[in-house]
Amino acid sequence: MRKANIHHVAARAGVSTKTVSRVVNNEPFVRDSTRERVLRAVKALNYRPNPSARRLAGQRSFLIGLLYDNPDKFDNPDSSYIVNIQQGVLRACEQHGYDLVIHPCDYRDSTLLASIEALLDHSRLDGLILSPPLSDLDELITALVDGGRQRRAVPVARISPGSKRSFADAVFTDDRGTCAEMTLHLANLGHERIAFIQGHPDHKALVKRYEGYRDGLRAAGLPFHADLVKLGDNSFQSGEACARRLLLGDSPPGAIFACNDEMAAGVIAVAHRLGLHLPDELSVAGFDDAAHAKAIYPALTTVRQPVQAMAECVTGMLIDRMHGRPPVNARQEIPSTLIVRESTGPAPRRTDASPVAVRRATTATDR
Amino acid sequence: MRKANIHHVAARAGVSTKTVSRVVNNEPFVRDSTRERVLRAVKALNYRPNPSARRLAGQRSFLIGLLYDNPDKFDNPDSSYIVNIQQGVLRACEQHGYDLVIHPCDYRDSTLLASIEALLDHSRLDGLILSPPLSDLDELITALVDGGRQRRAVPVARISPGSKRSFADAVFTDDRGTCAEMTLHLANLGHERIAFIQGHPDHKALVKRYEGYRDGLRAAGLPFHADLVKLGDNSFQSGEACARRLLLGDSPPGAIFACNDEMAAGVIAVAHRLGLHLPDELSVAGFDDAAHAKAIYPALTTVRQPVQAMAECVTGMLIDRMHGRPPVNARQEIPSTLIVRESTGPAPRRTDASPVAVRRATTATDR
DNA sequence: ATGAAAGCGCTAACAC
DNA sequence: GTGTTAGCGCTTTCAT
């Protein structure tokens, strides 16, 4: 007994194959009683339409593409982020009967659009999901949703783009507000000199985080000092470099807020090398709740984004859009939460000499 | 101008569509001159066969499935491993004109085989790649390669299975030998009490690592002490728990070798809490060179497996097998390398009182 | 070594 | 509402 096809179902239900097709694709204009009869036959024969056949015959492929920047680049180390996005997208795909095509690529490659068009061409994707920093490539997105040359337009949905301009549907978290919250958390612990480590400017969401830091300072009534802000590139190494410049400077900060966990880990490593005790002598905060946030010492205070939920949500939006049902809200926001662990604590009581400076004089282990 | 199909190519080359098909699929019995003429037409028209059409018409799907244990489980935290495997498999797929279907699943789920068969049924995969711990599920693999009920057999290839029995092709690294090497590294630093933290027994490769530890002790002429071996479950938390039992015991070790980086990170966190200075008072080693190995302090001495290369290799083997070319060697071994960083160092000179014991008496920060 | 015809399983367009 | 016909782009089988 071979696998059932549409003809077997049609025969068993006593209808034409076209009617089976209508039922399977949820098309209107089928009498309810007929629909039920067909569905019974589908269930009885355990019928599942052949994806290749429907791709070949129809205009739709039931395929969604997930694009992300190559996760094995040195400044792109948080593979748990990608994996969580995959998990969320897969879950939504499964629910809606879609299959997934993953496509790691290089967002800085000049042939990026061409390589995506080749993929579109080859796999005939029905829709595309862009994760950061690809979700910020406005010209790319415009090219895709407009359709170029002999290619038809593709529906696109974005995860965490930095701008809310209306190129395509998007799911967000409030990077800015949450960073203000984190800054306030540090201020409430008594910190007055709170430093910030910025991320790579290509990641527009990270710019939002910097804005949130400034909001937080303002809300806490704390002055902004430009020398307390350093620019990293998201990598651990850049976190280390920024930390050294901050901690070995003239008046080191009592708290450092790095805009991702990787750089925060770099800060912590440097603090250890300088012999600083955390959080007594220095508070450190990150953002992302990356896999290693709990695995470093002291466990990192950070922000957890509901990445899987965001991915599932954006996939649902994309599928709705593909089905001609524009989402009620093209900008879905999902809240993040502050996770306070061990790396942040009360500011040290003021003493004559800064403990950092004292310690620094006696320490030579830093390279 | 629409996309070229096989008829356009046939017309331009002045041959039948069947001949184009022969050329595109590298079938024999085509005169060289004809083949060249067809290839020229293919190139001129930028022809790429429609995957859905060839799946529908032929027996092959040009699709490979990659199975792995759900990466969001608490004791399965190393998503960089999965992502690297994906990258390697994707590269090989691209080279050979295959597409990839990723399938995270639960290796302990009783419906695992059924869910894989559903996938096989739906996507008509030509072959399957199993990553650990799925690569150790011998009954599952036997069921797949034998083919059950109305399903035909599927070629399977395994990444890092614990046993080299001949269920299916496999790619390995020398877990045992490399762990012996690491143990010797510690012994050569002067350590005599070297503890080992075992992993979850479902991961058979981790059992090999334990055997390597014992080999290493033997090679170094060091006695084996059962109380220096603790059983973890691969998670950071279990690493912490084992570390506490080891370090708070009667005669604590001078070095701890955890069989993965996650548990090693747990050991390091506990050491920090106990106020131990690493590596002066305790050496810690891990295995995997996970993403965070460089991001913790002190940077972790560990073992780097060439995960991407292994994934690429195993995919090549699988494709060869699918094409009826059994690999020359069904068990490919790829070497791993010891990465010595900062977490291991010379054993402390013997003193009357163990520094650990001294420090422990004055430390109350451990919870 | 090459080609003609049939058909994979489905949907599109149109008829009824 | 439902069925008929044609065809998506390829591979198969079998002829020559």
Image (cartoon, coloured by chain):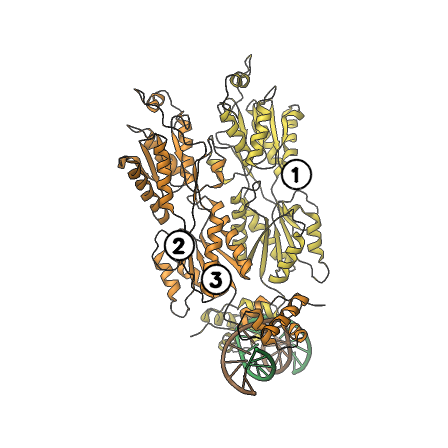
Chain colours: A orange, B yellow, C brown, D green
Tell me which corner region of the image, top left, top right, bottom left or bottom right, holds residue B148: bottom right
CA neighbours of label 3 inside 10 A, class few (<14), some (14 to 19), many (20+)? many
Q: Is residue B73 left or right of residue B111?
A: left
Q: Are marks 2 and 3 in contact (CB under 8 Å)?
A: no
Extreme residue in the top direction:
B352
Q: Where residue A319 is drawn, which disc sits there? A: 3
Secondary structure of the residue carrying numbered label 2: helix
Residue A59 percent coordinates (x, y): 50, 71
Please tell me which residue lies in front, B97 or A227: A227
Q: Are marks 1 and 2 in contact (CB under 8 Å)?
A: no
- What amino acid is at disc 1? Pro
CA neighbours of label 1 inside 10 A, class few (<14), some (14 to 19), many (20+)? some
Name the quadrant of the N terminus of chain B: bottom left
The vertical placement of A144 against A343, above or below, is below
Question: Mark 2 or 3 closer to N-term?
Answer: 2
- What amino acid is at disc 2? Ser
Secondary structure of the residue carrying numbered label 1: loop
* Mark 2 on the same chain as mark 3: yes
Q: Where residue A135 is drawn, which disc sits there? A: 2
Residue B280 percent coordinates (x, y): 49, 22
Please tell me which residue lies in front, A327 or B42: A327
Residue A360 percent coordinates (x, y): 35, 23
Tell me which corner region of the image, top left, top right, bottom left or bottom right, holds residue B178: top right
- What amino acid is at disc 3? Ile
Distance between the alpha carbons at the discs numbered 1 and 2? 42 Å
Q: Are marks 3 and 1 in contact (CB under 8 Å)?
A: no
Q: For residue A228, say whether it is visible.
A: yes
Residue A211 percent coordinates (x, y): 31, 44
Q: Where residue A36 is drawn, which disc sits there? A: none
Q: Nearer the viewer, mark 3 or mark 1?
A: 3
Where does label 1 land, which residue?
B201
